């Protein structure tokens, strides 16, 4: 009787990562971690599952609806939909043991039951870093440094980190006594990239009840342009008398001073008073990062300063600043910009097996190359050599090493460079240097 | 009105990883990945959630009961309880694109609703590697090499990899015409470490209906002791005439020949005809790894050869061999053996802030040290220096770098080694070399 097979398939909105996709993904994650670590950020992890009450109401109605939520025994549980809410819970629960200031990074999978569409998945990875327990602008400056160094280490040279400080707009609203209309004003300002300023002014008047003059002042503040120093001076003038607004300008000045002092190219950091990043969460510096070659894909690394991370879980005030790397967006961009090598193996060298009698020699040689720092695969079978070369080409190996009876008699290895097709007989004691030269 | 706080807590059987636990964990995972990659194994990932039908019935009744399973819309879904069943599904679904042979590693979280107990969690990480699509013993030999090199790279020198081949016992059962009683025989043999051979012989007679002579032959085969060569010869004699058994002995011989040829110390690889590793799954070579200092914690890296990975999902025969590193067990062992440094920061250097006027200088210096390869944290606030040193000691920093007005006037940095308490004034151009010397 023929057995019925189960159809091998993945859930809608979920995907397998094959090696060609997983290799650059792992590399990117490892690069991000190494930069975070270089700034003293510490790794943490939290469970995939939390009590539902921990997660609900934190990411808005949309997040609640999208949560993977179920009963486990008598417990109402849910899969985490981001790393921020678990971090708030984690900090409230462990802060006494951790001490402040506390710098952490967290790379982890999150789940959202969104309607699947092109490029959107129900399972994806987030890559966050935050400094909490300090209001020092020094942490804000380092957040900018990290974003910069991360982009460079990933391989980008042409990008812009756009920064602003929420205190600037808040300061103006304070001066104009418009704090209670801030939601409507922010909602209107969010449309600035799409609408013309006159339309945004009109919306602020209609939705927020602002006077023409009030709305114009806001537009004037958020659209000021020019050299960084000019923008800062202009903001300072417009905010004169607002303690909050002046502080915001001062913090921005400090960031630009420190950035210049540290030798970070000035054209990579742009002051943009129009960015706000959502309505409520951020209260100080905010960051967005755009690739010069692909600005349309949106920000690839964003974040900001907030006043209180964990107010729903503890009375302890935990101010902080942090950002998040958009992993999938970056990988898509790197793919589009041809920055990803077309390989499906982490090893550049394949040792071919020509003759089963010499298997121990092939295995020994491969291991010695590994001890010298190379990644080396041994083809497991002694199939036709043509088949082994096909395998090497298919997966993007750079070098094939082979030897049969003749070579063992002559005590040499044949080293074939796949791209050029050149083949050289090399003595074993010279093999490491020879291969190193080829791979460089 | 006082807001009601939500109690910050984790689910029973789940845990947060704080930095002191997460730092060695990340290091161990990265070490494992680097060894897998050095042998040409390719990274993959699969979703945390699968259709329940993919997962049920594969790990036995126990696994089915322990699955986190729920309805998602009209779909019956479950969280993966291991990486083997998802790999079988993955292979069946993608093998045409991947090609064979296919070597993969997979490091991922899995979930089991076990009754929580000391050291057992409902969420844990697995760390598997497999070669599929080949029956070549060459892949079995490399599996042993990988386990060996992995243990050494993690930092162990005193360990034993115990190997056997399931064809040996199968060969004897074939000769004795006892294949149909293999379950009862294996169940009895599993008790050999605890019971004396006479009791095991008795159980085989009672449960499997074996004659005294048959049971004695089995015990004789599985308990043969001595030098590796003597054991191999003895097995060969006892299995004379069984093609299957003789092949098993030949494969083991090849493993020992290649191991010796590759320069792997002979005392780390032990032939143990008594190990079987479960009843059904494995069909060829099997591996277990024990630490000399802590044999009682059980095997820290185990695996074996199997005939057909994905028979429930495809008609394509996919033989393979692989093993799995016991991450939590290894970390517990390393903790017990004092192999883990007592730090909660990935950075050995803390740059202290004495005077807010110099913040850009502290930040610049730290960044320059990073560009020279050091991990460096800057204390974000200009709090009392005593507090900053307390922070440095608490987290295990090795060096604190500081400077106030005097030092900036003299153009030096004070470098304090925390363990010895020695403090030295160093010119900036000499700082990198000085710090490198201190950390070596």
Image: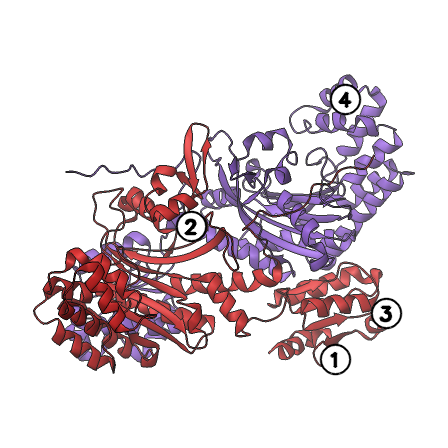
Chain colours: A purple, B red
Which dot marks residue A204? Answer: 4
Place of residue B235 in the rendered image (x, y in percent of width and height, measured from the top left): 17, 74
Query: Do discs 2 and 3 share a chain?
Result: no
Query: Do discs 4 and 3 share a chain?
Result: no
Any part of residue B273 in sight: no
Query: Do discs 1 and 4 share a chain?
Result: no
Query: What crowding class fits label 2: few (fewer than 14 Cα within 10 Å), some (14-19), or many (20 or more)?
Result: some
Place of residue A430 in the rendered image (x, y in percent of width and height, measured from the top left): 32, 78
Chain holding disc 3: B
> Residue at image x 73%, y 51%?
A140
* Disc 1 element: loop
> Residue at image x 74%, y 62%?
B379
Q: Is residue B67 left or right of residue B399?
A: left
How much space separates mark 1 and mark 2, taking CA atoms? Answer: 46 Å
Q: Report which residue position mark 2 lands on.
A: A22
Q: Is residue B97 left or right of residue A176?
A: left
In which quadrant is the C terminus of chain B drawn? bottom right
Which mark is in front, 1 or 3?
1
Any part of residue B376 in sight: yes
Query: What crowding class fits label 4: few (fewer than 14 Cα within 10 Å), some (14-19), or many (20 or more)?
Result: many
Which dot marks residue B405? Answer: 3
């Amino acid at each position: 009787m023929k057995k019925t097979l189960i159809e091998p398939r993945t859930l809608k909105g979920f995907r397998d990562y094959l090696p060609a996709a997983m290799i650059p993904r792992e590399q990117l994650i490892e690069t991000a971690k190494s930069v975070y670590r270089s700034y003293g950020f510490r790794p943490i992890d939290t469970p995939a599952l939390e009590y539902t009450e921990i997660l609900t109401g934190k990411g808005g109605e949309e997040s609640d609806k999208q949560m993977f939520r179920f009963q486990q025994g008598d417990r109402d549980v849910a899969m985490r939909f981001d790393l921020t809410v678990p971090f708030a819970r984690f900090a409230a629960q462990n802060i006494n043991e951790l001490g402040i200031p506390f710098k952490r990074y967290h790379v982890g999978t999150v789940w959202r039951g969104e309607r699947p569409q092109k490029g959107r998945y129900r399972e994806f990875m987030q890559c966050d870093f935050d400094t909490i327990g300090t209001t020092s602008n020094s942490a804000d400056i380092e957040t900018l440094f990290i974003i910069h160094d991360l982009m460079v280490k990933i391989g980008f040279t042409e990008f812009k980190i756009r920064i602003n400080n929420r205190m600037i707009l808040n300061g103006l609203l304070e001066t104009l006594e418009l704090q209670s209309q801030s939601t409507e004003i922010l909602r209107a300002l969010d449309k600035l990239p799409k609408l013309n300023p006159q339309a945004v002014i009109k919306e602020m008047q209609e939705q927020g009840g602002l006077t023409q003059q009030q709305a114009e002042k806001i537009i004037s503040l958020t659209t000021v342009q020019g050299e960084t120093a000019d923008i800062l001076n202009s903001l300072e003038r417009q905010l004169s008398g607002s303690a909050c607004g002046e502080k915001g300008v001062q913090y921005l000045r400090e960031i630009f001073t420190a950035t210049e002092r540290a030798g970070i190219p000035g054209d990579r950091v742009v002051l943009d008073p129009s960015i706000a990043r959502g309505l409520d969460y951020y209260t100080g510096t905010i960051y967005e990062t755009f690739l010069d070659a692909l600005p349309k894909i949106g920000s690839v690394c964003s974040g900001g300063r907030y006043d209180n991370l964990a107010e729903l879980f503890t009375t302890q005030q935990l101010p902080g600043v942090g950002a998040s790397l958009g992993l999938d967006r970056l990988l898509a961009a790197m793919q589009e910009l041809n920055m990803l090598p077309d390989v499906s193996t982490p090893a550049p060298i394949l040792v071919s097996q020509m003759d089963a009698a010499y298997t121990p020699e092939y295995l020994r040689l491969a291991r010695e190359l590994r001890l010298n720092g190379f990644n080396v695969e041994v083809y497991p079978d002694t199939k036709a050599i043509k088949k082994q070369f096909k395998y090497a080409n298919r997966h993007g190996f750079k070098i094939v090493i082979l030897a049969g009876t003749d070579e063992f008699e002559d005590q040499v290895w044949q080293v074939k460079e796949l791209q050029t097709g050149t083949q050289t007989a090399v003595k074993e004691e010279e093999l490491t240097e020879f291969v190193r030269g080829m791979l460089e």
